[in-house]
């Protein structure tokens, strides 16, 4: 009698410098018979050594590690092991990290606050298609990057935009930057044009959405 073909489990290497996170990941993977966790590493150096010796099907890679960047490690692993699946797992899940993972050659990008099922799904994708990048917010991130690339504000326009975000009117803005009110109005009009906005509120909302302005974190200087 034949019970059907046996399938080998997907072997996984976990890379994170926090023991609790690795333990949680291990439990999640061990609950799915599709996977077999074959190793754990808390640093890039250990991860590279284990990847070479264990040749896992999938590597779950944290971005921030004590001896360097997980994205740099991902790039190194991709060059050493072209067919390995690499899932970047991080609590810093912004567009910059997502696009960095894509450029480093990762197979998938998942935030650490995602459900365990999403991590497992990303690992299965990575094992099956290591060179095909997957991320839940990829399409939106690509749109934001393309939009930001099209919007090129000059240094002076960025100063004006930050002062607008601070709530300054035209007169106060002009005084702060030591320019005439007509020049200030000209800069504001150009900013509105570039952002496709009709007023201050629309301009600020669009700038925040596209990442041109980051919650007023930068102090306005002349």
Image: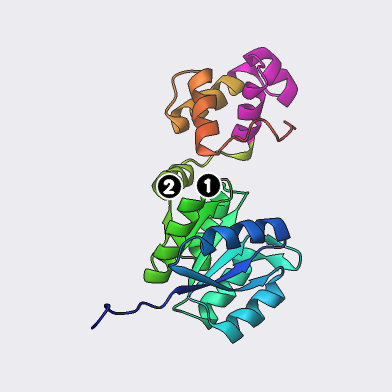
Q: Residue at x 64, y 78 (%)?
A: 48
Q: Decide: marks 1, 2 in contact (CB < 8 A)?
A: no
- Magenta range is 156-182
Relative to 219, residue 95 above or below: below
Relative to 65, residue 5 above or below: below
Magenta segment includes 183: no
- The residue most toward the left is 1
Q: Residue at x 48, y 75 (%)?
A: 57
Relative to 39, residue 66 above or below: above
Task: Decide: few, some or many residues near mark 2? Use Cα within 10 Å; few <14, some 14-19, many ≥20.
Answer: few
Say which element carries label 1: loop
**Coordinates of residue 155 in the picture (x, y in percent):** 63, 39
Asked where in the image residue 160 lies, by quadrant, the reply is top right
- Left or right of residue 47: residue 190: left
Residue nearer the viewer, 62 or 191 = 62
Q: Residue at x 44, y 19 (%)?
A: 198
- On the question of residue 18 being in view, the answer is no
Asked where in the image residue 33 lies, by quadrant, the reply is bottom left
Relative to 6, residue 14 above or below: above
Say which element carries label 2: helix
Magenta segment includes 158: yes
Estimate the spatial distance between the alpha carbons at disc 1 and disc 2, rounded to whole Å. 26 Å
Residue 114 circle label: 1
Task: Decide: few, some or many residues near mark 1? Use Cα within 10 Å; few <14, some 14-19, many ≥20.
Answer: few
**Coordinates of residue 131 in the picture (x, y in percent):** 40, 70
Residue nearer the viewer, 203 or 222 = 203
Residue nearer the viewer, 70 or 186 = 70
- Left or right of residue 165: residue 133: left
Q: Which residue is mark 2?
A: 146
């Amino acid at each position: 009698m034949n019970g059907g073909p046996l399938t080998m489990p997907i072997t996984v290497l976990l890379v994170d410098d926090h023991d609790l996170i690795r333990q949680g990941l291990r439990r999640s993977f061990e609950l799915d018979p599709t996977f077999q966790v074959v190793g754990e590493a808390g640093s890039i150096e250990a991860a590279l050594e284990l990847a070479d010796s264990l040749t896992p099907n999938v590597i779950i890679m944290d971005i921030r590690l004590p001896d360097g960047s997980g994205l740099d490690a991902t790039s190194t692993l991709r060059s050493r092991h072209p067919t390995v699946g690499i899932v970047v797992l991080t609590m810093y899940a912004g567009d910059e990290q997502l696009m960095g993972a894509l450029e480093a050659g990762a197979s998938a990008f998942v935030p650490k606050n995602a459900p365990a099922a999403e991590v497992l799904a990303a690992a299965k994708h990575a094992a099956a298609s290591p060179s095909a990048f997957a991320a839940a917010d990829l399409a939106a991130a690509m749109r934001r990057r393309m939009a930001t690339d099209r919007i090129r504000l000059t240094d002076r326009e960025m100063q004006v935009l930050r002062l607008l975000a601070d709530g300054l009117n035209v007169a106060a803005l002009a005084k702060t930057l030591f320019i005439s009110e007509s020049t200030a109005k000209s800069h504001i009009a150009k900013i509105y044009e570039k952002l496709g906005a009709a007023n201050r509120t629309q301009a600020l909302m669009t700038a925040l959405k596209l990442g041109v302005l980051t919650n007023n974190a930068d102090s306005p200087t002349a």
